[in-house]
Every structure is written in structure tokens, then in C-alpha cells.
Image: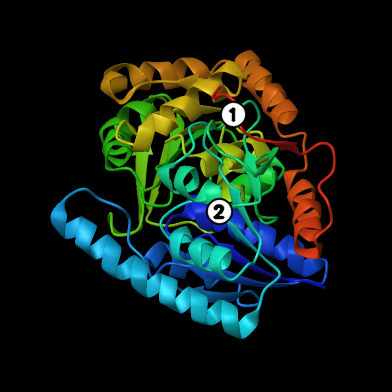
């Protein structure tokens, strides 16, 4: 059996697939260690998996401002030193990184120690970390149809993003019962990603009464540090009680997505993978300041594949009517669900696990892996 390091900290979008992969590798008898950041979101999520080993690594994101650049250099140097010591002590067989600022130290250290490195990019526009570090990798996992030019010596596999086993589609009424939602009323779930989205939280607050009038429930996951948990009770036009919930963090995402008729969310790759797993239609509002505008690219692909709709943040004034039009159109919702079922057909965890086992064992890659470079799609 092999030993793997999975660098996946910094955001839920990086950590969640890392946990999913760690559980799959562990189930096959391998040993895994998660490299995560010191951020609260990492701590909150990983503590739900006490059977998985985790190391908190000092790191910081890149920035051009002098103070941020200095912090980046200092903390990444610390992270690199820690990583190299860890590698020399533990001698893992392979390293896989899921992008983000926690990858740098361990990937560079792995290259220097001669340990094979794989990188996974889930976004339709590869991030800076993957673009820079890919030159040190032997494997690169990219979304279907995405290419990266200018890299040599890397074997590329097109596949999806691993999703935790705990996130799965449940029967709608069972999920509604778990969160206390009325099964006879429509439900919109608002999710801003692991960090939350202030603009979506505000939109939910401002539109609670209007949705309640139509008999639509709202469940908003606001993000850590963006308010306390609370419940509201409102009334529909017919006088019936309509509930709303605001929660800073949820560790039952699968339940929420299964309970929802429609999700309103940002367009991170992790969120989209979870929507696909739970077959939940969505209206995506891409974060306009995401690096390289990658959320817009993710959202456009999602819409093109028929999983839902996309609305820009500048068009939030029309969002309420858009949501109401979709949520009461059962034919359209069923069409979205059918498309999502098709999108989620591939078992990407099995694909990645098998390939990582080959990488760790030094097995030559199969024909389905091909050499880069290629062109960007």
C-alpha cells in the first residue's frame, strides 16, 4: 500500500474534494495526510473527519501589494521548510494538490525530493497556483474540454471534481424533514460558498417577505463570521406560515441541496460538483472578482450543459422574478435535473484513485493519458 499527501486547504472548494479523495484512498488500504491551512473553515470541516490525518501548514496567498507580497514570501518559505522536513521523515509515495496557496511549499519540496506530484484543477480557467506549479507535476487533472498551453512532461487526464460520500441525493421529503422545512411549499437554498457571499445574504434578507407572500421558503447559508444562526416566521398571502433560516455554516450540504427546489449560489467548482451530485437546479451568480474570472467560465459551462441559469451580480434587481419564474415551472426544473444527472455520470474518484496508484507505483501511464502541451479551450 502507498502513502499519499493531499494538499487541499484554504477554502471548502479545495478541502472538500481532498477529503473525498482521502476517504477513497483510505478505503483501498492506503495512508493519507491532508495538508490544510490555519483558516477557520478548514478547521471546522476537517474536524468532522477525525479518522483522517491532517497537518496545518503555514501559507499565504500571493498579492502584488508590498505587505501582502512580503507575507506571501515569508509564510510560503515557512511552509516549504515544514513540507521538506515532513517529506524527509515520512517519505510518501506521491503528492496531489487541489490548487490554492497551500500547494506551493509541498509541491516544490516534493519535486526537490524526487516524489511524484499530481495536480487537480476544477475550474474552467486554471488558477495561478496550478499554472505555475504544473511544470513540477507528472500528472494534471483538468475539467473536460479544458487545456493548458506551454507545459511539458505532464500527463493530462480530463475528469471531474471528487465529491464527499456524505454529499448525496436524498429523497426530497426525507431531506425536508431533516431541516424542518414544509414539504408542501417551495424551497430556495442560498449558498455563497465556504466563505459566504455578503451580496447574496443581503439579497435573501431583502426578499424574504416577497418570497413568503408566494409561499416560498428560504434557507441561507451565510458563511462563517457573517452573522449568527436564526430562524424567521412569515406569512403567505393565504395566511399560511412560511419559514426562513439563516445559518453561518452547514455540514449537511447534501441534505440542503436535496431539500431544495432551486439553489441560488456562487459558481465555484466545488459547489457545481455538489449540485451535479444532488441533481439540484441552480441559478448561479458568479463572483465578479474571482481570479481570471473563473467563476463566470464555470457558470457559463453549467448553463450550456443545462444545469440551470446564470445571472450577473449587476442584474440582481431582476433576480427575484427570475427565481420565481423558475421555481414554479416544474417542467423546467425536471429538465434541469435530467441534465444534471447526465453531467454527473462519470465516477471521477475511481479514475483519479487508479491513476494515483499507478503514479505511486511507477506504473507507466495508460493510453487514455496524453502528453501536454495543448491549446486552451
Q: Which mark is drawn over residue 146?
A: 1
Q: Which residue is mark 2?
A: 136
Q: Residue at x 45, y 28 (%)?
A: 284
Q: Hey, which quadrant is residue 374 in on the image?
A: top right
Q: Position of residue 46 (x, y in %)?
A: 53, 69
Residue 240 in sight here = no
Q: CA distance from mark 2 to mark 1?
A: 19 Å
**Height in image: 22 above or below 173?**
below
Q: Earlier in the sequence, mark 2 or mark 1?
A: 2
Please tell me which residue lies in front, 138 or 188. 138
Please tell me which residue lies in front, 151 or 202. 151
Q: Quadrant of the N terminus?
A: bottom right
Q: Residue at x 81, y 64 (%)?
A: 361
Q: Position of residue 15 (x, y in %)?
A: 53, 58
Mark 1 burial class by Cα count in 10 Å: few <14, some 14-19, many 20+: some
Residue 81 in sight here = yes
Amino acid at each position: 500500500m502507498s502513502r499519499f499527501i493531499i494538499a487541499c486547504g484554504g477554502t471548502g472548494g479545495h478541502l472538500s474534494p481532498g477529503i473525498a479523495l482521502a476517504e477513497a484512498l483510505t478505503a483501498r488500504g492506503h495512508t493519507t495526510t491532508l495538508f490544510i491551512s490555519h483558516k477557520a473553515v478548514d478547521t471546522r470541516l476537517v474536524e468532522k473527519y477525525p479518522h483522517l490525518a491532517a497537518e496545518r501548514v503555514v501559507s499565504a496567498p500571493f498579492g502584488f501589494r508590498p505587505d501582502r507580497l512580503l507575507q506571501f514570501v515569508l509564510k510560503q518559505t515557512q511552509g516549504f521548510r515544514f513540507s521538506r522536513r515532513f517529506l524527509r521523515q515520512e517519505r510518501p509515495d506521491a503528492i496531489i494538490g487541489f490548487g490554492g496557496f497551500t500547494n506551493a511549499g509541498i509541491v516544490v519540496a516534493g519535486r526537490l525530493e524526487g516524489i511524484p506530484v499530481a495536480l487537480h484543477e476544477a475550474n474552467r480557467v486554471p488558477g495561478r497556483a496550478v499554472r505555475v506549479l504544473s511544470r513540477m507535476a507528472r500528472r494534471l487533472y483538468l475539467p473536460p474540454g479544458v487545456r493548458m498551453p506551454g507545459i511539458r512532461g505532464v500527463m493530462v487526464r480530463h475528469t471531474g471534481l471528487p465529491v464527499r460520500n456524505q454529499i448525496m441525493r436524498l429523497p426530497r421529503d426525507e431531506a425536508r424533514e431533516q431541516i424542518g422545512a414544509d414539504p408542501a411549499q417551495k424551497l430556495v437554498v442560498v449558498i455563497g460558498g465556504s466563505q459566504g457571499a455578503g451580496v447574496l445574504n443581503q439579497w435573501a434578507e431583502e426578499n424574504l417577505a416577497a418570497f413568503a407572500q408566494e409561499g416560498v421558503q428560504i434557507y441561507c447559508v451565510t458563511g462563517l463570521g457573517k452573522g449568527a444562526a436564526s430562524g424567521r416566521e412569515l406569512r403567505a398571502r393565504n395566511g399560511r406560515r412560511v419559514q426562513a433560516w439563516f445559518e453561518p455554516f452547514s455540514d449537511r450540504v447534501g441534505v440542503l441541496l436535496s431539500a431544495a427546489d432551486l439553489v441560488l449560489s456562487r459558481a465555484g467548482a466545488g459547489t457545481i460538483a455538489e449540485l451535479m451530485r444532488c441533481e439540484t437546479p441552480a441559478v448561479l451568480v458568479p463572483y465578479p472578482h474571482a481570479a481570471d474570472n473563473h467563476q463566470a467560465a464555470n457558470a457559463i459551462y453549467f448553463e450550456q450543459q443545462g444545469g440551470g441559469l446564470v445571472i450577473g451580480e449587476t442584474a440582481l434587481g431582476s433576480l427575484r422574478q427570475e427565481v420565481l419564474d423558475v421555481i414554479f415551472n416544474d417542467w423546467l426544473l425536471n429538465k434541469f435535473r435530467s441534465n444534471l444527472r447526465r453531467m454527473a455520470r462519470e465516477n471521477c474518484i475511481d479514475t483519479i484513485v487508479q491513476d494515483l496508484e499507478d503514479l505511486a507505483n511507477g506504473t507507466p501511464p495508460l493510453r487514455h493519458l496524453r502528453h501536454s502541451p495543448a491549446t486552451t479551450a
